[in-house]
């Protein structure tokens, strides 16, 4: 079985666990609208959900189930973060009811539970396109707690216990962190910015420094740290399939101690900074286990760690290498800092007073 199939099976296992948790929550509920622990959604089977549509924000959010879990259709099909999909299901299914207010459609608009006036609408849709169920969240109760809520395919309007909140931002359903690493686990950082290139490496004393310092120059340690520390946490603000008119000429390469290498190609357009990224596991020596040969625990841990790092790098590349990420400008500035910003002229050491007086004293003695 190849790595791609293993990755897909792993993702499916995660989704199955998430859905199992959600199904378990459904089976432990009170009656709808009882006011004593009833819930707005009763008996929904999350396994039947093929599509989720969320409206009420600046733009609609659409999540679609794929072979390896949900993807964010409104972000070009970028993989959704499983925990955020789980949160959406949980928050929707945990809307508890305090009391019934009305079933008269004429009151919907005033309460904010008509489709036109609602602050939030969530639709759970089956594979054949039919509505499994949906929720409508309206106005907050004036002078009290809770909000007006109803089922999209129901007539009764209730006041909720507490104030239900649904994330209506598409980017909030993806994992926005690309790289997160401890500084001590980074072996080197290489930068190619414009016509300048340099490497920051870990020295024998575990301190970091430029691999080569030009003669007559010394390093600005604060600026050096900004570049190196940029590799510890790299996040994005948006993800896109393509951006026209961007040349990805700058490079930022992070080499980890476990032989993983992250490569960023960075370009700018107007006030935005965009990046492409991939990962590679550079230790090509195969991991072998000889039958009948005893392996000590430490060696076994090292081999296991190598396999984990290799699989992680391959999964990262498969997920991200066909995408373009909008990177915060402050982060990109540190990732593309020119070498000249890291250097300054070496201070000229002044001669001490005693040394300066020696030639004059010698001349007088002569």
Image (cartoon, rainbow, N blue to C red):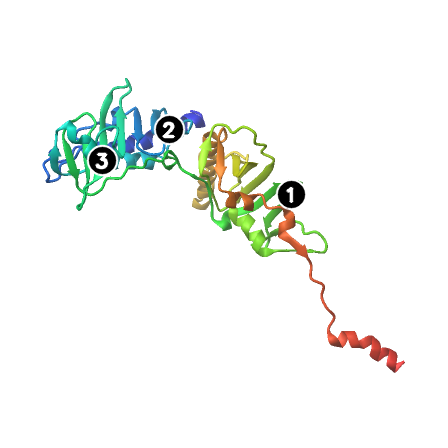
Q: Nearer the viewer, mark 1 or mark 3?
A: 3
Q: Secondary structure under badge 3?
A: strand
> How far across and down, in percent of the image, does residue 211 sit?
64, 49
Q: Determine which quarter of the picture holds residue 190.
A: top right
Residue 295 visible? The answer is no
Identity of the residue drawn at 25% across and 24% down: 48
Label 3 with label 2: CB-CB less than 8 Å: no
Q: Position of residue 121 (x, y in %)?
A: 26, 31
Image quadrant for the N terminus? top left
Residue at image position (44%, 43%) is 301
Q: Residue at x 40, y 30 (%)?
A: 79
Cα–Cα gap, marks 2 and 1: 38 Å
Sequence-first disc among 1 and 3:
3
Q: Quadrant of residue 129?
A: top left
**Disc sitting over residue 175 in the figure:** none
Q: Which residue lies under the disc numbered 3?
A: 138
Closer to us: 109 or 293: 109
Would you name the residue on which mark 2 appears?
Answer: 71
Q: Nearer the viewer, residue 115 or 97?
A: 115
Q: Horizontal placement of 280 versus 124: left or right?
A: right
Residue occupying image coordinates x 22% and y 29%: 114
Distance in Å between CA atoms under marks 1 and 3:
56 Å
N-terminal label among 3 and 2: 2
């Amino acid at each position: 079985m190849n790595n791609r199939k293993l990755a897909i099976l792993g993702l499916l296992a995660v989704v199955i666990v998430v859905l199992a948790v959600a199904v378990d929550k459904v089976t432990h509920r009170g009656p709808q609208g009882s006011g004593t622990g009833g819930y707005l959604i009763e008996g929904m089977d999350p396994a039947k959900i093929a599509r989720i549509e969320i409206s009420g924000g600046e733009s609609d959010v659409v999540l679609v189930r794929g072979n390896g879990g949900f993807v964010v259709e409104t972000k070009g099909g970028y993989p959704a973060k499983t925990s955020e999909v789980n949160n959406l299901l949980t928050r929707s299914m945990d809307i508890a009811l305090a009391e019934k207010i009305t079933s008269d459609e004429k009151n919907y608009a005033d309460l904010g539970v008509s489709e036109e006036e609602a602050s939030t609408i969530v639709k759970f849709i089956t594979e054949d396109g039919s509505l499994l169920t949906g929720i409508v969240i309206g106005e907050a109760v004036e002078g009290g707690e809770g909000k007006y809520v109803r089922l999209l395919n129901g007539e009764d309007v209730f006041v909720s216990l507490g104030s239900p909140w649904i994330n209506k931002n598409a980017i909030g359903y993806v994992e926005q962190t690309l790289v997160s690493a401890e500084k001590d686990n980074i072996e080197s950082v290489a930068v190619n910015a414009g016509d300048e290139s340099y490497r920051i490496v870990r020295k024998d004393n575990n301190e970091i420094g430029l691999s080569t310092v030009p003669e007559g120059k010394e390093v600005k340690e604060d600026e050096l740290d900004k570049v190196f520390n940029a590799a510890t946490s790299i996040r994005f603000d948006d993800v896109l399939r393509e951006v026209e008119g961007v040349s990805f000429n700058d490079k930022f390469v992070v080499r980890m101690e476990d032989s993983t290498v992250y490569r960023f190609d960075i370009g700018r357009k107007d006030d935005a900074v965009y990046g492409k990224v991939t990962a590679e596991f550079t230790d090509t020596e195969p991991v072998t286990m000889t039958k009948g040969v005893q392996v000590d625990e430490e060696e076994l841990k090292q081999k296991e760690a190598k396999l984990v790092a290799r699989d992680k790098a391959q999964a990262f590349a498969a997920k991200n290498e066909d995408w373009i990420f909008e990177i915060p400008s402050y982060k990109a500035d540190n990732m593309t800092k020119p070498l000249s910003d890291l250097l300054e002229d070496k201070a000229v050491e002044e001669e001490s007073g005693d040394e300066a007086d020696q030639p004059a004293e010698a001349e007088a003695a002569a």
